[in-house]
Image: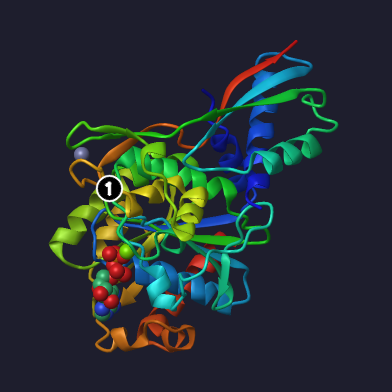
Amino acid sequence: MIDPRREAVIERINRIPHVIPVLSSKGGVGKSLTSTGIAVLLSQMGRKVGLLDLDFWGASDHIILGVSVDEFPEEDRGILPVPKCGLKFMSVAFYTRNQPLPMRGSEYTDALLELMAVTRWDDVEYLVIDMPPGLGDPFLNLISFFRKGHYVVVTTPSPLSVMALKNTIHMLKEQKIDIVGVVENMSSQESLKEFLDEQGIRHLGNIPMINDIDAHMGDCEKFASSEFIKHLRRPVERIAELIG
Amino acid sequence: MHEWALAEAVLKTSIKVAKERNIKKLSEVEVVLGQLQDVDKEILEFALENMKKGTVADSAKFEFIEEAAEFKCRNCGNVWRMNDNPIDDAIIKEAVHFLPETIHSFLRCPNCGSADFEVVKGRGVYIKSVKGE
Ligand SMILES: Nc1ncnc2c1ncn2[C@@H]1O[C@H](COP(=O)(O)OP(=O)(O)O)[C@@H](O)[C@H]1O
Ligand SMILES: [Mg+2]
Ligand SMILES: [Zn+2]
């Protein structure tokens, strides 16, 4: 048996000029808010942006942006990502309709291949990818398919999160993958600057605890006007400068 | 029609295999169509016939083999077929058509209720063989 999707996936990926995976092996550090924020900010800067939620077990980006999953994305010689907030958005939530999606790692890989094989990003210049936590199948697929991505790692200053950061950086360096830098979330200062300097990794900036963040979800304008986005702007400008 | 994207994948992969095996002219490609994904064979065939022109698959015959879907529960070992209990909800059918893994959002093992089952057969579109010279 030959799987026809791999070839299609590789071709589609090669057509996207810049891929920005947002990851961390730790959950709950702000990957979803950061990746969605990066996509919104890049699109505000006039770039053509796609946002792909690859956290199939815990899809969240549609909730942040207020994308309705009551209808299937349009079909035209493939599947067209849904236009929202000035960007193109794709998530499994359109197909699970917010039902849980319990599945094994091998099934995750199958779903990833299927979605990537048929989704048409067309003129998208920057594809931002939101990842589930961990170093399992999703991570291993990511670094295998998106070797040329510009990776952004999210962390908090907690020692528990820093351990995960260390390990994520370790894996990416070992695979000679480009790390654009680290966003230090839920932190009032750049407390990891020294640690990252030692690692030779860029500190892109810190984002403090935002008390009213919940009130800024579920709507493009509200999210775009949040303090979170305000603090993420400088890191994203740096990302844009760095990757061109 | 997302069948066009699947057809593109089948064609490109057939061409790649032909190149790898030094095949100058493809004569036959056997394509398995899994019942779970329920792709429209006519559209897939039309798309392939349309896109193959001018490629190494120009005169290739695309043979379609339909495969019934079969599941095996990882929790209790129960094996069952899709035909035993066909899905009739149009929305679920369409979701599974786009993304077969979403079956885990909607189907449970009829014996023990587990969502942890394997699609043993008939998941989606695969190439069974590529022939030519
Ligand atoms: N800077 C912040 N200030 C306040 N709450 C935050 C901040 N960053 C993330 N959160 C909250 O923390 C939780 C986890 O964020 P999320 O983006 O879902 O993380 P991950 O995707 O890494 O699991 C969410 O409830 C989110 O609203
Ligand atoms: Mg998340
Ligand atoms: Zn069972």
- Please identify the quarter of the rendering in which residue A79 is found: bottom right
Residue labelled with disc 1: B108
In the image: residue A81, left or right of residue B62 = left
Q: Is residue A147 above or below residue A187?
A: above
Q: Nearer the viewer, residue B32 or A4?
A: B32
Colour mode?
A: rainbow
Q: Quadrant of the C terminus of chain A?
A: bottom right
Q: Amino acid at mark 1?
A: Arg
Can you say whether B18 is above or below A91 in the image?
above
Task: Determine whether A136 is above or below A205 in the image.
Answer: above
Q: Residue at point 74% right, 41% down?
A: B47
Q: State the residue in front, B61 or A220.
A: B61
Residue at the image position 82 percent from the left and 27 percent from the top: B58
- Quarter of the figure with residue A215: bottom left
Left or right of A166? Residue A99 is right
Does B113 sit left or right of B88 as displayed? left
Q: Position of residue B64 (x, y in %)?
A: 63, 28
**Residue B92 position within the rendered picture, expressed as x and y whole percent measured from the top left:** 44, 56
Q: Chain of mark 1?
A: B
Could one spot residue A189 in this view of the protein?
Answer: no
Q: Quadrant of ligand 1?
A: bottom left
Can residue B27 be seen at all in this image of the molecule?
A: yes
Q: Position of residue A46 (x, y in %)?
A: 63, 76
